[in-house]
Amino acid sequence: MNIQTQALLLEDPELATVWNHLRHLESAQPRFARALRDTIDQLLNGEDTGRYDWNSLYKTEKTHAGTLVEIKLQREFRFDDGIDMDYRIADIDVDCKYSQQFGAWMIPPEARGHLCLLVWANDEKSLWSAGVFRVRDEWLNSGNNRDLKLTVKAQHRDKIAWLWRDAELPENVLLHMDPADRATVFAMKSGQARLNELFRRVQNRRIGRNVIRTVAQQKDYMKRVRGNGGSRSALRKEGFLIMGDYESHRRVAAELGVPVPLEGEFVSTRVVEVGPQDTRRSAMLDARLWARARDDEAPMPGPSLPSHTE
């Protein structure tokens, strides 16, 4: 907590109560991040549209984002309905405002005097922020749109008591991958072939389920990842391991030194068999030792992953 936030909490007991309540919710930060990731993914609707870029949304869809964020957060944290504002948090009314452009929160006139939960997320930067703000006239720009909605003056954004500032938003892999690799993935004719190419080209990075849905564009997208004909079995002969969020898979990822999949995520990596003298981080699979392959090492059939019950 910085000095400015400390001062705001001391000056405004209600703000301090709400701020502390939100900060101390169980696993609050990752749950906030996941709600924002899910909101953006819901708007993109990649399974039906193939979209992965916020800029491809229609204006009406972008406008709807704020309502979706409000709903997602209420469902995630089970906030009570407010009396005059969106939520009732720690027995205090709190409005919720989201903007994809930092500082562009549109605050309605009826929120004057109330607390606002201000939320920002940017898919291109993979960052998000959330803070609590007391709505005061002297800290606002005058409303100049039809609804007379107000924005926070730039010089008074220091009046926002940040809960999390520039926190990591789960990555939109399709948006951030190499454009040539992305084009190659989408050039494949079938959903299975596109997924196989995705796992070849996006290694050692967390890949969320929405990416899988967008690439597969099939209702049974999860079947296309697993063994028995999915990417996991198809790429095994090339030495690829595709680890999911099972605890046994997470353990293998940690042993290999690759990002550990979080809930609903996958991580692909190519491995080679190594001897005990090899200094690379390694995992014992199928009674043999395996490590991440270097680019100059030829592909070889890989091991099987432990079952999710192990």
Image (cartoon, rainbow, N blue to C red):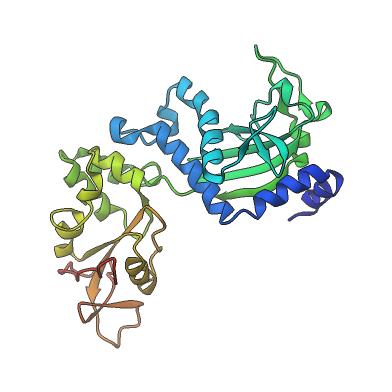
Residue 238 location, x and y as percent?
A: 17, 63
Residue 275, relative to residue 292: is it above or below?
below
Residue 291, relative to residue 165: is it above or below?
below
Decide which of 52, 5 is in the foreground and name it.
5
Decide which of 47, 113 is in the foreground and name it.
113
Residue positioned 21% across, 49% down in the render: 223
Residue 286, relative to residue 37: is it above or below?
below
In-image side of 223 versus 49 (left or right): left
Residue 21 location, x and y as percent?
A: 69, 50
Split into 4 quadrants, where in the image is the C terminus?
bottom left
Residue positioned 56% across, 43% down in the render: 78
In-image side of 139 versus 70 (left or right): right
Decide if residue 178 is in sight here.
no
Residue 182 location, x and y as percent?
A: 29, 43
Q: Quadrant of residue 175?
A: top left
How many numbered marks appear?
0
Split into 4 quadrants, where in the image is the N terminus?
bottom right
